[in-house]
Image: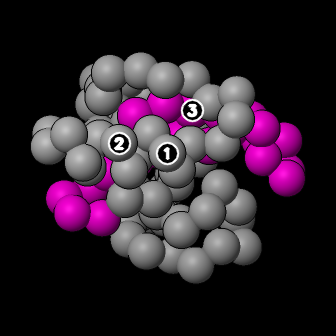
Amino acid sequence: MRPLAAALLLAALPAGAALAEPETYRVTGLPPGEPLSLRAEPDANAEIVGEIRGRVLIFGCTNDTPSRTTWCRARLGRTVGWARRRYLTPD
């Protein structure tokens, strides 16, 4: 990953977020064929910026969110957003 892209990802993590090397996770716990929404903010009402159907790179997770649920910072191709940790399993 380019240094600037890594810096932008880390800057977007809320205070208290776990900082970690990117890891590959896969979507689980959803009905077959249903994608996991990748959102602009760690909030279920935030704009959907992408859909995860298989695997995704995760850069850290936090529950320091308005809903107190755990969200993970994710990159899917060139799209960066937030995904619910509940539906992600380490690969």
**Labels 1 and 2 touching (C-beta < 8 A):** yes
For the question of whether residue 18 can be seen, the reply is: yes
Q: Amino acid at mark 2?
A: Ala
52 and 77: which one is in front? 77
Residue at 29% x, 41% y: name it: 6
Residue at 19% x, 59% y: name it: 77
x, y percent for residue 16: 70, 28
Spatial separation of the CA atoms under disc 1 and disc 2: 6 Å
On whether residue 74 falls in the magenta region, the answer is yes
Provide the residue designation for mark 3.
Answer: 61
Q: Quadrant of the C terminus?
A: top left
Provide the residue designation for mark 1.
Answer: 11
**Labels 1 and 3 touching (C-beta < 8 A):** no
Sooner in the amino-acid sequence: mark 3 or mark 2 = 2
Q: Amino acid at mark 3?
A: Cys
Provide the residue designation for mark 2.
Answer: 7
Q: Note whether 36 is above or below 88 in the view shown.
A: below
10 and 75: which one is in front? 10
Sooner in the amino-acid sequence: mark 1 or mark 3 = 1
